Image: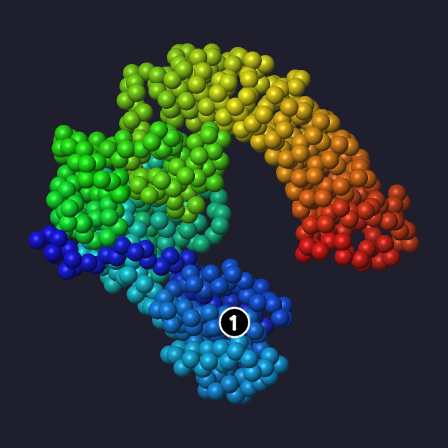
Amino acid sequence: MALKAMKENSSSSSSSSQQWKYDVFLSFRGEDTRKNFISHLCKEFRQKGIIIFKDDRELEKGKTISQELLKAIESSKISLVIFSKNYASSTWCLDELVKILECKNSGNQIVLPIFYDVNPSEVRKQNGSFENDSEHYQQNDERVQRWRLAMTQVANLSGWNLQDREESEFIQDITKDVLNKLRRFSHSIAKDFVGMDSRLEKMRLCININELNNVKTVGICGMGGIGKTTIASVTYKEMQCQFEGSAFLADVRETSRKYGLFTLQRRLLCATLMERDIDVYDEYNGVYHIKNRLSRKKVLVILDDVDELEQLELLVGKKDENWFGVGSRIIITTRDEHLLIQHQVDQIYRVEELNHREALQLFCLKAFKKDCPPQDYMELSNEAVNYAGGLPLALNVLGSSLYARSVKEWNSALKRLKEIPNEKILSKLEISFDGLEEVQKKIFLDIACFFKGKMKRYVMKVLESGGLYPAIGIRELIDKSLITISDNCVWMHDLLEEMGQEIVHRECREEPGRRSRLWLYTDVCHILMNDTGTNLIEGVVLDYMFDQGERYMSSKAFLKMKALRLLIICNLNLSKDIEYLSNELRYLEWRGYPFKSLPQTFQLDQLAELHLSYSRIEQLWKGVRPLKLLKIIDLSYSKKLIKTPDFREIPYLEELILECCTGLLEVHHSIGLLERLVLLNMKNCKSLTALPSSLCNLKSLKVFILTGCSNLEELKDNIGDMTSLDVFEIAGIGSTSLPLAQPWDCLCPWWLMPKKPTPAMSFELPSLRGFCILRRLNLSHCGLTDATIPFDLSCFPFLQ
């Protein structure tokens, strides 16, 4: 019966829906409308939370629009075509129009024409200002015919005609119509989630968006994994356009503990006011800003995963304190219903589990990539659904873990499920973890303990340094519904995070030093103060600031961490010099490293990346150290660094970052041996007076930054031998008395200028012909006369 009902009512599609990036794409002729109509329209759209794509470039005659622009059109829900007097004179606009019409005809886009100081009939018939508008119309080729057809078809669509109307009123009507049409798209979002339609309807009743004379707070509560965040997210996407500002604050519980509530207050203000950076220096200051700046603004605020009353009181205020404007809506998700009662929310929506039909449909979408199971898996599928219950997270994870498995493997997994009590959700989820390969398990546990919410690029880099092949591993974890990628960050559900951390805690509940991973400040303190490190510890990550007080911890515990492969810590003070760090370390990041050098016993054979920014390092190490795998050295802001190490045994180094090492006096001449170096950043190394002549041997160098090296006395004549150089920044080098303050990619330096500049004096620029792929050349503030400025720039074909 459930299978039959599921087939009859398949409101969710297994195919992924269109991935929209923008609400509205604007196609317009810049010279006609950019500084007036378009500017005012964009301001109104942004105030209403409408995400727009507006290209501000003017394309040179004869050039075609880029793939980036075509992709933007495809990624927009609505295209607004603003026909103005000179619209048809731009081949760029006309090519946009053809692409827009293609998207409309494929059923993926709404197209709305706006007639700005032109008559719709002129566009339809291509007469008046649209008649032979440009020489390109004289050609009767296929491209011109497509332009003509597109103009006729789009001009026949229902839209708006300015005529003699007030522009401000005209813009308000357009905005209102666009918002109404965007709501149709948000209704379709629910179809991507099984059972979402009915749950979303209940949320609409709770929120009652049409009740405009009050501020309403709605709580969503239920057990972990039941879909609270998903419901809140879909509600947010559907309704955000109806408010003057909106903010979705994810992971309130975790973020407040790691970074403080004032961080969330800043995010709330930046999102609702659409400002990039608002200074909030503590929680009381945050409360002041929220109350004063949002009290007359109609906003939608989502607080996801709240677990303490203080979080609510400092982010949205107490009941009847009126922090927000009339008509505002506050939505709170939590596992704790009593918390909502304490806060006196207006309504509570208790999320129910999926019924059997919905649960079976969701499970099958994951296990078979379709709505229903094959005949020989039907009974097994029903069994699996019964064991998982109506919990969407469990159904997602279990279904994904059984995808493409044999009947025998299914039976084995279901046998294990039968042995787990119904209330032990984490244990059910752990079946999916048990089915992973060893490398996949390591990646999963590293993300659960260390990297949830971190940028994907950063996570990939750290995992890659540890030899875990994350390009494949992360893809496999995504396929198994164990992690997701959102906004280029790595995420996992709270329950899966708890499961991963519980797996590590089980390794030894009594003694943190006998666990493989450490991420809690209290655990790290315990180990360092009690010297309980062991060879079981693989990773220690404390990447946020914490108050150590007067406690100085012992470095002896590191002596026993023989298997440590990953160490990321910030501003940790130790009582004595560190004597040992594991020879297995692959990635070392120690912000504020407190010692003058690395320990002599430290064998860096396996190290791939070394990050010691803001350290007290004077010399990284003495002599030659064989570092065959090291790719990155970052000593930025290490103001006591005097000289760089000997590079002779670091053949694979790709990046050397010495930015703001203001005490640096010497760069070792062996730097010229780094055949793979692509980035050298010595910005603001103000004590540096000379560079080794061997620098010219860096044939792979692409980025060379010397900006602010004010005491640098010369650059070698053969610097042009760096044939791969793409970015060369030397602003402000050589003399603090010269007015060189802004960064550029290549700047004529001070030593080329006459000693006593006079209007008549001239000099020759050195040969830079080796920089054949240089992108930008700026000779500002060099005292050059017209006679000395080089007019032949043909040796720089990529100069922008």
Taking depth in this image into account, of 593 and 581 the one nearest to the observer is: 581
Secondary structure beneath dot 1 equals helix
**Which residue is at a point 43% across and 45% down the rendered structure image?**
488
- In the image, taking residue 198 as reference, residue 579 lies left or right, namely right
**Which residue is at a point 48% across and 83% down the rendered structure image?**
123
- In the image, taking residue 560 as reference, residue 363 lies left or right, namely left
Quarter of the figure with residue 527: top left
Amino acid at the residue labelled 1: Asp
- x then y, percent, for residue 373: 18, 49
Tag count? 1
Quarter of the figure with residue 442: top left
- x then y, percent, for residue 2: 11, 52
> Looking at the figure, which quarter contains the C terminus?
bottom right
Please say if 558 is above or below 657: above
- In the image, taking residue 344 as reference, residue 139 lies left or right, namely right
**Which residue is at a point 18% across and 33% down the rendered structure image?**
412
- x then y, percent, for residue 585: 49, 22
Pointer 1 residue = 95
Taking depth in this image into account, of 731 and 49 the one nearest to the observer is: 731
For disc 1, the neighbor class at 10 Å (few under 14, some 14 to 19, many from 20) is some
**Which residue is at a point 29% across and 36% down the rendered structure image?**
496
Please say if 166 is above or below 786: below
Q: Residue furthest right?
A: 760
Taking depth in this image into account, of 546 and 586 the one nearest to the observer is: 586
Please say if 326 is above or below 105: above
- x then y, percent, for residue 676: 63, 35
How are the colours assigned in the image?
Answer: rainbow
- In the image, taking residue 337 as reference, residue 493 lies left or right, namely right
Residue 184 in sight here: yes
Residue 163 in sight here: no
